[in-house]
Image: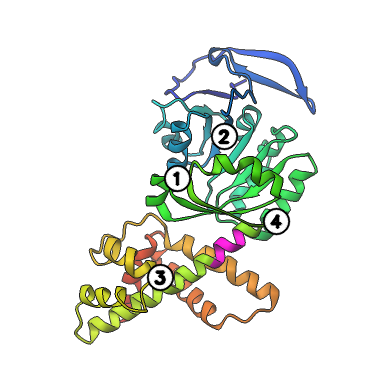
Amino acid sequence: MQPAYRHATVCQPNTVYRLHKSNGRRKGRQWRHCAALNHEPNNQTGNKMNVGLIGLGNIGASLCRHLIASEHDVTIFDVNADAMAAFSDSSARVATSTQGLAQAVDVVLLSLPNSDIVEKVVLGKDGLASGLAVGKVVIDMSSSRPASTRDIAQRLATDGIHMLDAPVSGGTMRAAEGTLTMIVGGEDAVFERCETLLKIFGSQIIHVGPSGSGHLAKAINNLLSATTLASACEAVQLGAKAGLEPEKLIEVINASSGRSVSTEVKFPRYILNRSFDDGFAISLMDKDARIALETAQELGFDTPIGSTVGSLWQQAVEAGFGGRNHTAIYEYLETRHD
């Protein structure tokens, strides 16, 4: 039997990790822990919490660094061993399974690519639901489908487990700075319980409503962001075709009514220099736009502008740009004019 978690050092193959068994049981499952850690699951000292984090990608890695700096007890898990190895010199512990992580923590943060993966991690075989005790909290910081989020929250609630959806806005730069905007859905009491923890990562924490509300608000915001970026790219390319210098046109736009985050931040930082290294993939922007548009379709709400924009981002994915960072939509639009 492998330990539920171990200190984040590189573990040697064929090493035996001694386990101590306690007599504590919950629903027939027995707590197990590494003796070397002298760490009981769910232990809290003062304001410290036992926090689990699953997903150490572009955003998740920054979340992990902030958690470690805040001196919470942190347990991590990722299917990518290299992502976990990046924290081998930190105080974080590495879980060997999602179930093991669940047994060791009070709150689990998820930073995952999509709803399908979230559902598997939470509800799948040996997932979080099989290890979390009554009263514990799952916080999904991914960009997920609201309907899926509501379903997961309802299923967890039957076992006395709470859930918040808390997707983030601000990208990799603000994630590294700890200045993300966090858009939260879920019960008031659970939000109030977790608000201090969320403030580690964000400068603005906005509780927008019940379960699924955070994910819906994030998707709508990103549909709007996809619209402003695509339209700004098209406008600048039109100006260039007519002989205007892109840098000068952006300067004019940013001093005028057409300015936006796309022209004020993304163009100077990622597009004009053609680095396109913003850290957020075109495929993810496409996914978020589709979440918003699927909600509109379910409601019978006509979205002539949004649907056109959504189609554009989907075409970029189909043209092979899905893995590129989202500011590379500029390059995709250039290919349409060749």
Are the residues flagged by discs 1 and 4 in contact, CB closer than 8 Å?
Answer: no
The residue lying at 77 percent from left, 44 percent from top is: 157
Q: Which mark is residue 52?
A: 2
Seen as rendered, the residue at the extreme bottom is 242
Question: Which tag, 1 or 2, sits closer to the chain's start?
Answer: 2
Of labels 4 and 3, the one closer to you: 4
The three-letter code of the residue at mark 4 reads Pro
Q: Residues within 10 Å of mark 3 (few under 14, many from 20)?
A: few
Q: Residues within 10 Å of mark 2 (few under 14, many from 20)?
A: many
**Nearer to me, 199 or 292:** 199
Q: Quadrant of residue 211?
A: bottom right
Mark 1 residue element = loop
Separation of marks 2 and 3 at Cα, in angstroms: 38 Å
Q: On the rendered structure, is 216 left or right of 129?
A: left
Q: Residues within 10 Å of mark 1 (few under 14, many from 20)?
A: some
Separation of marks 1 and 2 at Cα, in angstroms: 15 Å
Q: Give residue 24's position: percent from left, percent from top.
A: 75, 18
Mark 3 residue element = helix
Q: Give residue 161's position: percent from left, percent from top.
A: 73, 40
The residue lying at 31 percent from left, 61 percent from top is: 276
| Span shown in magenta | 215-220
Question: Which tag, 4 or 2, sits closer to the chain's start?
Answer: 2
Q: Which mark is residue 57?
A: 1
The residue lying at 34 percent from left, 75 percent from top is: 233
Mark 4 residue element = loop
Are the residues flagged by discs 4 and 3 in contact, CB closer than 8 Å?
Answer: no
The three-letter code of the residue at mark 3 reads Ala
Question: Which tag, 4 or 3, sits closer to the chain's start?
Answer: 4
Mark 2 residue element = strand
Query: Would you name the residue on which mark 3 appears?
Result: 319
